[in-house]
Amino acid sequence: MTPNDPPALRCAGLTHHYPASDHDVPALHDVALSAARGRVTALVGPSGSGKSTLLRILACLDRPTHGTVEVDGVDATALSARRRRELRRHQLGYVFQNPIDNLLGYLTVEEHLGLATRLRGTGPAGGELLDALGLSGRRTHYPRQLSGGEQQRVALAFAAAGDPAALLADEPTAQLDRASAHLVGEALHRLATLGHAVVVATHDPELTAVADDVHELVDGRIA
Amino acid sequence: MPKRGLPAPWARAPMMIWRQPAVVLAVLAAAVLVALPAAAISLFLSSAGTETLQKQANAACEWAVGAQWQGQLPVAPRNPQVPEKVGKPLLDARLTTARQAEAGIPDLSPPVATLITRANVAIATGTPVHPEQRLMNLVARDGYAGHVQVLSGGTGPGIWLPDQFADTQQLKVGDQVSLTSGSLPGSATAGNTTPLATMRVAAVYRDLRSLPDGQYWCSLKNLYRGSPLSNAAVYPMALLSSDDLFQATDPDDSGVGSSVESSVDTTGMTTASAAPVIDGLDRLRARSADPEDPLGAAFGHAEYTSSLRGMSDRADQVTSALVTTVVPMGAVGALAGLVIAAAAGSFWVDRRRAELAVLSARGVGPWALVGKAVLETGAVVALGAVAGWFAARYLVAAVGPSPLVTPGALTGSVLAGGAALLVTLGAIAVASGRRITAHFDTRATRARLWPWELIPLVAAVVCYFVLGDGTVAGVGTAGSVAGIPPRLVVVPLLLVIGLALFAARIVRWSVVRANPVKVTRPVSFLSWQRIASGPAAAAVLIGATAIPVALSVYATTVTGSVDRTLHAESQLIVGSDLVLGLTGPAHVPPGLAGRTSFVDRYDSGYVGSTTVNVLGVDPETFATTAFWDDALPGPTLAELMAELAAPGAPAGILAGLPATPATAEVRINGQATKLSITTVAQLPGKNSGFPQLLVRKDLLDRLAGENAHPQLWVRGDPAQSLAALSSTGTQIGTVSQAQDVTANGVYAAISYTFVFLTAVSVLAGAIVVVGLLLYLNARARARRSAYVLLRRMGIGPPAHWRALLYEVGGLLIAGFAFGLVFAAAAVAVTSPGYDLDPGIAPGTLLSAPWSLVLRLAAATLLAAVLATLAAQRAVSRARPAEVLRDTE
């Protein structure tokens, strides 16, 4: 990673509307930001301000109405659906708000990481990741055998396995207690130090505390 | 080293679906609902073809179905100088040759020989009681003794006489009778009174005319009963051996009537198994026509006939006529099943949403996810397809025209079931794929806002003008058969589907915009809020209810109306359920009291210079016996009979000659009389092209005397009426039944079409039940959570159940009401086509299916009550602690 390397994630002029039968509902307006590897970027703002929409667009799950999203210097908005999927597979990891929604109930922790590396076509890494996130004793456990905080940390490991450029997490501590939220915050910070760009939408001070950059969204605009 | 094989989410997919019973149920039901109509098409067509064949065979004389050689059998050489076989040796030769030629043809009986000649039969010593009634048909038929009811005698050689003849001539067993030439006046041997033979009366048997007709005698029916279309005299039939018959034959006659015939056992015969029999019968035909062939040489100029090929051809025609209606209906049924399959696919996505979101977020594409859907549902779909095939087989066997189907149809249905399996998987794949791409990686679109349900409505309009309304489905060597015009099937199907989709959109739009502020009662408010929270689901449930209701009501209306119209037409042609030509006194048993009327018929009357058929009727009994439908134009039959019965100048009711003056001169049997004439459009019994005149019976009897043919008209079940009259010894000649008008397979395609449409409607009803279960199941989780909270707000179980009932029952009742409206619309558009023979009065008679509507309403309410009770039971089991942590 050098200073001349493009940011792992960058967006500019992002505008997004949700269509309805009689009028469009605006969600984002002319949003621009970037997230570099090794840093934790937090998106904060009230409910309905557009955080989740922005995160889904950055994760290439949705297309914006206008604007561009670059992943590792590649304009994702200009790509076909297939190429965007490839980007998601190799360069992006995404963590949903609900811990259990991030995991497959019929796979153990170890199998989750195996699936992630297989999908990304990388080697069978992941042991170190579990060690780094304090989950080494949970390798053979199923999601139902884990606490909410552990589930969310496994979800982070699952998202990070295979070394994607960026990790995006949508309010990952919203359903966790304070202690678990603290551990997740530490995990996010640790993942950033491993070289990932981490973008997290949150209300949680535990997460904003570990963030290197904090952007506030108000009514779909960066304040 | 990379792992081989599929990743775990795909490798474990086939076992994962079993943890989701609701998805298994939905997929299983969808596969059954697609496979059933698809597999049923070929089975049903084959069943209809077989039943058409069977019905024709059962209605026909079994000897006519098989092989028949009919013609003269010479009793003396044409040229004494040229030796040739005649008489008994020739008959034996024909039998032997026929037996050899028929060897190897399946289901064919050994040949039976019949000889027919005519003779005067009278007591040998003494004076005949009625010398003018001595002429008899002499019949020698193999095995006759086993097929008559012997009243006396029955042993020893001699002649067997029918009881009516024996009674008239006062002959009894043991008497000697002389047989003299029975040639008709004008023939070379007419007037020869020298006895040809004298023989003993060996038996007296029950006259066949006073018994129901049996199959053994059917090829001689016209001989002993006379033809319904002929006024020729009918003579009693004496039975005797062939040797005695030859002895009683005038050697100067050219020969005797002869037939050699073999019947076909059509029990269990299908159109496929009939093929080798038909081929064999065709070979016999070809050989009989070849004078070089031993068979042709033996039978000479005898005519060979067999009706089995014609019956088979007609069965094929009926099948072809059905294709244009049954295939679209089956396709619509399968299409409706595919809608459920698509819903099941979407349902699967909903149940797998979290997992799919995880995989999609990690770059797994829709094709791979669809592959997972196929892997998960494949086994269940296969199971459903197999169950659907068995259900189709069972349904066709149980309620189809015939349980017999051809092996080809079985193969076709298996292939259709296999195709249904693939198509169902395809529908699940497409629906799940669309659902997946709708959630992940799509641009927002307004496509769903387009009124695409107008497509079937536009298609209905196009089909109305493009599709024909002809009712003649096929004209070929076997004649024509009537078929339902495709317009009557395709247009309503498209119309109902389009209207249902459109109604669903309107409902959804209305629910979103409706203002529930005025709903203040908690139960009503709760049910309304639940409907409003899922307008799409509510709209789908209403549409899914409306379609089967509309289709079943429409199908039943058309079936009833076509049946009523055909019934009226056939009854008008014959006159009543049963019209008997009488050859002697009739004794009406008490069981038929009030349902019979004596009528005289005279076919050569004149009104002015126009030939008319005249019926002499008893006004008191005719109005209650003859057929009439109040939908017929003009005065009722009772009013017309009142005119005939009124005192004053004799009156006549005339149909088919509209420009007749109020008073006209009528000539009957050479005698003229003035009648006051009332002209009407139609009268019962008008079965010829001539106008028909109804007069009082006493007037016709006075004018026509014995030249009028006595008839007995009977209302009610013809078989029972015939049996009752036979038991009283009523001497019946011709028999005309209204049901025979439609018994020749002409209308078979129509009957079968609506059997299939009704089955499709029932199938559609099953789709509603599955849709209802999906509706309830899809919302069960939210409902369970809500119930826990509602309990804390004071909503008890009864109130919650009422709210459920209002919600589900309201939607079902709305769907039911929409269905009735759609059915009425379909009937309004197509009703002119229900008269399949517009040339025959009375035109379309509509039949409203009130009974079905009531039953459907009851079924709808019952479904709502049972479904909501089950849903209430499910939510009542919810434990707050679990519900509030419920994440799955």
Image: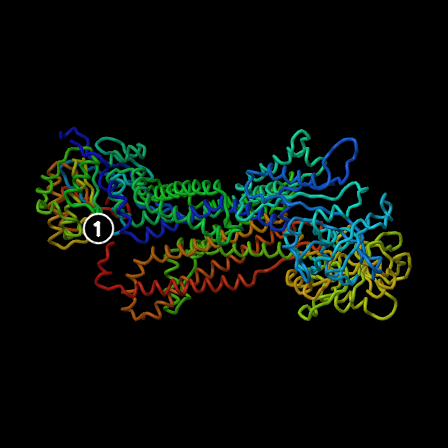
Q: Name the colour scheme.
A: rainbow
A144 vs B683, nearest the viewer = B683
For the N terminus of chain A, the image quarter is top left
Q: Which residue is labeled 1 in the image? A: A98
Return the x and y of residue B556 as percentages of the image width and height.
56, 56
Q: Residue at x 39, y 58 (%)?
A: B532
Residue A221 seen: no
Picture layout, residue B397 above or below residue B527: above
Q: Residue type at mark 1?
A: Asn
Asked where in the image residue B871 lies, by quadrant, the reply is bottom left
For the C terminus of chain A, the image quarter is top left
Residue B236 seen: yes
Return the x and y of residue B315 as percentages of the image width and height.
58, 44
- Position of residue B454 in the picture relative to residue B444 (left or right): right
Asked where in the image residue B715 lies, by quadrant, the reply is bottom right
Check disc 1 and report its element: helix, strand or loop.
loop
Which chain does tag 1 point to? Answer: A
- Position of residue B341 in the picture relative to residue B460 (left or right): left
B751 vs B253, nearest the viewer = B253
Return the x and y of residue B788 as percentages of the image width and height.
27, 65
Picture layout, residue A162 above or below residue B767: above
B164 vs B357, nearest the viewer = B164
Q: How many numbered circles does the render carry?
A: 1
Picture layout, residue A65 above or below residue B840: above
